Amino acid sequence: MDLGIKGRKALVCAASKGLGRACAFSLAREGVDVTIVARTPGPLEETAEQIRRETGVTVTAVATDITSVEGRSLALEACPSPDILVNNAGGPPPGDFRDWEREDWIKALDANMLTPIELIKATVDPMMERGFGRIVNITSGAVKAPIDILGLSNGARAGLTGFVAGIARKTVRQNVTINGLLPGPFDTDRLRSNMKAVADKAGRPLDEVAAERAKGNPAGRFGYPEEFGEACAFLCGVHAGFITGQNILMDGGAFPGTL
Ligand code: NAP
């Protein structure tokens, strides 16, 4: 299927690895020029070069922290008027809420709620004026089914989801959609580091815990980041103009509800 977005410009946050990287790759395969952001220059440049080599699109790499004011200005300087915005950042650490101070909450809210809101604010009006825009927020399956040790994530992402629900119906008339894409367990560094915390706490080997968890998913495996990237690209395509304000769960069927 031709997604109809060849020549568009995308800003993809937190995209040197994992799900963000997969989204950037899938968009680039559709002919979208991508600006990718991550803090560590080495892996970021490596990803940028791989995308260029494989797809031939223009790739701009911005090594910065997207959760900082300066980082967001650098990203927007490199891609001032994106047609597509993929919001993403590292997830907050696991833990017990009794140990979290105000500072921990502010950090989580900054990364997983306020940064996407700031980027939406900076880009949505020009998208509406141009009559095309696609915003995808990478959140988490925890928006639908909270994970006890990820309380910081549960809270911050619920805040973003509530905010987006309020504005996504205000932009769609100008062909600008805003949706959440909710990953369940995808095989990335992030998943492995979360599982390591669980394995260490239980005093068990990581591989054993990972195999058990993959087997326990209805699909019998973890998600492949490429599957996530392709779903993101579809939501950014011209055919997805009637989908807005939705939270699309990709978890292999792990969430047990009917709806
Ligand atoms: P990942 O494999 O660890 O990749 C994270 C990417 O984000 C890296 O490129 C990292 O590069 C970049 N990044 C992190 N913090 C950043 C910042 N402040 N500024 C700019 N770039 C930043 O993680 P992932 O699995 O793709 O997860 C992506 C998001 O989905 C996270 O919020 C995670 O909590 C959420 N999620 C993932 C899963 C899963 O199963 N994988 C499930 C539910 C939710 P640098 O470190 O160099 O900056």
Image (cartoon, rainbow, N blue to C red):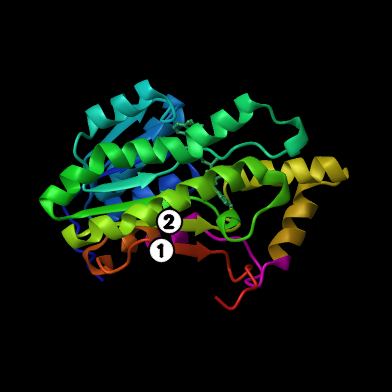
Asked if residue 29 shows in the view, the reply is: yes
Q: Is residue 221 above or below residue 80?
A: below
Distance from disc 2 to disc 1, alpha carbons, whole Å, reads: 6 Å
Residue holding disc 2:
180
Q: Is residue 205 above or below residue 249?
A: above
> Tag 1 or tag 2, which sits nearer the N-term?
2
| Image position, residue 241 (x, y; %) | 24, 65
| Image position, residue 248 (x, y; %) | 46, 64
Q: Is 193 in front, or is 140?
A: 140
Secondary structure of the residue carrying numbered label 1: loop
Image point 33% across, 38% down: which residue? 119
- Residues shaded magenta: 216-231
Q: Is 137 in front, or is 164?
A: 164
Asked whether, in this view, residue 200 is left or right of residue 43, the answer is right
Q: Quadrant of the C terminus?
A: bottom right
In this rendering, the count of numbered labels is: 2
Asked if residue 30 shows in the view, the reply is: no
Residue holding disc 1:
246
Image point 73% across, 38% down: which residue? 97
| Image position, residue 150 (x, y; %) | 67, 45
Asked whether, in this view, residue 189 is left or right of residue 116, the answer is right
Q: Is 139 in front, or is 46?
A: 139
Q: Quadrant of residue 178?
A: bottom left
Asked whether the residues under the numbered discs 2 and 1 touch, taking CB atoms below 8 Å apart as contact, a structural biologist would say: yes
Q: Assess whether residue 42 is covered by the magenta stretch.
A: no
Image point 45% across, 32% down: which residue? 43
Mark 2: give few (<14), some (14-19) or many (20+) Cα within 10 Å.
Answer: many
Q: Which mark identifies residue 41?
A: none
Q: Amino acid at mark 2?
A: Gly
Q: Quadrant of residue 214?
A: bottom right
